[in-house]
Image (cartoon, grey):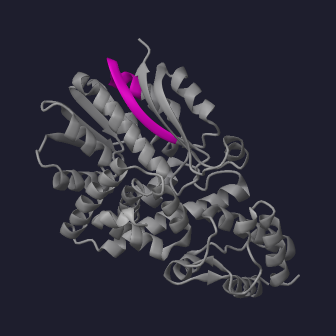
Amino acid sequence: MKSINIIKDSIKEINLQLKKKDKIIFKNEFQILGPKSNLDSLVIVNLFVSIEEKIKEVIGKEINLLNEDFFDKAFNSKYTLADLQKDLDKKILKKK
Amino acid sequence: MQKLKKYKNYNLLVNKVISKSSTQKIKILKFLSFVDTLYFNRAEAFSKEFLKYLKVQKIEVDYAIKAYLKLCSDIMVSQKYFIKYKKYPVENEKTAYKAVYDNVKEMKSYMIGIAISQFLWPTHYAMYSFFIEKIAKEKSKIDSYLEIGPGHGLFLLQALKQLKKNTTYEVVDISKTSIQITRSIVNFLLINKKKINYTIKNIYDFDNSSKFDFITMGEVLEHVENPKQILKKLKQLINKNGSIYLSTCVDCPSIDHVYHFKSIKEIQQMIKSCGFRIVDSHILPVEDIPMKEIIKKKITINYCAHIKKIN
């Protein structure tokens, strides 16, 4: 399973719990954290839990997306879905 | 936000935080849209003094903002662990002591972050207001005051400002760094100096030959393995007609929370089983959604209470 599909599935799952105006839009430039983001911290946490759990099912190993690199990038500029996909690919490759 | 601009120092802190974090921006601006003038006045007074304190201590404002954001990100990391494994990331006091209370760098950042949160988080501010209200109500009866785990010292400062001139003060904390921070903040911000006895000790080992008219113990119960033991200790330390302010929380994972309270009822039952009656209390969920959903999703609920010993 490709990382992009894992992200897509998790977004679908999380969006079910969100109001229309708060839904995550599946596009590269969508900001998870950043000046244009309106995601609540708990939504971000739940999104990452969902992705990490799906990854574990696929590769059998734990990964951690909510790390120092994420917060550094997010607090100093922005963290987009494209960044998430890049990080995910890196982590999957490393764990394989 | 137009109103915020009137409060120069608070505006500076808020803007520095919200320019860095979108999640904080949403929460803080929502909160500030419904607070009153008293809130802004208190927040400005705090910010003005706090910024002065940082300057004297040669602490950069940006360091303080980073410390606050670290607190927020640590909570997110702990929440993720809690959702995944249905338990808090820290299992015992020893681990928390080593990672936080005995770690100068970590503790300093933590204390500064928590101090800022007092005026950015609705639940923290509500508990602070509740405390101010209770201490004001009880002040004529208080000749001796004990605070356990004073942290940033803001509650202690309120007591020092409001209580009678000859009140005696005792402060206990397990962390040397925490005591140093409390002492330096209090010494800096208190105009009329008062004698305060600071003790670095685990509260279990605190000498209970002395009794107190008022005890403050904010956010301590969830940091220990056996909160019941602490409540029993409080019963020994409080005078017959004295009263206690305490606060804790339900489903609140953090880098140093050890005991997991699963409901408000559990806290209240524990307080009562240790020989206290609850005079007044506040139940404060951290999200603005129906209580049913808060409980179902295991979202943090802060709790503070004014309690008295059943004689």
Q: Main secondary structure of the magenta part?
A: strand
Rendering quarter of residue B46? bottom left
**What is the x, y in percent for residue B87?**
67, 51
**Residue B140 appears left or right of B214:** left
Q: Residue at x 50, y 42 (%)?
A: B224
Q: Which residues are magenta?
A: B234-248
**In this rendering, does residue A56 appear at all?**
no
**What is the x, y in percent for residue A88?**
73, 82
**In this rendering, does residue B141 appear at all?**
yes
Residue B131 is one of the magenta-drawn residues? no
Most foreground residue, A27 or A79: A27
Residue A83, compared with residue B296, is above or below; it is below
Most foreground residue, A83 or A14: A14
Q: Residue at x 35, y 62 (%)?
A: B108
Residue A77, compared with residue A44, is above or below; it is below
Residue A91, compared with residue B149, is above or below; it is below
**Residue A76 appears left or right of B151:** right
Most foreground residue, B61 or B33: B33
Residue A48, compared with residue A76, is above or below; it is above
Q: Residue at x 67, y 86 (%)?
A: A83
Most foreground residue, B80 or A42: A42
Residue B243 is one of the magenta-drawn residues? yes
Rendering quarter of residue B143? top left
**Residue B74 appears left or right of B43:** right
**Residue A90 appears left or right of B238:** right
Q: Residue furthest top?
A: B311
Q: Residue at x 61, y 56 (%)?
A: B89
The N terminus of chain B: image quadrant: bottom left
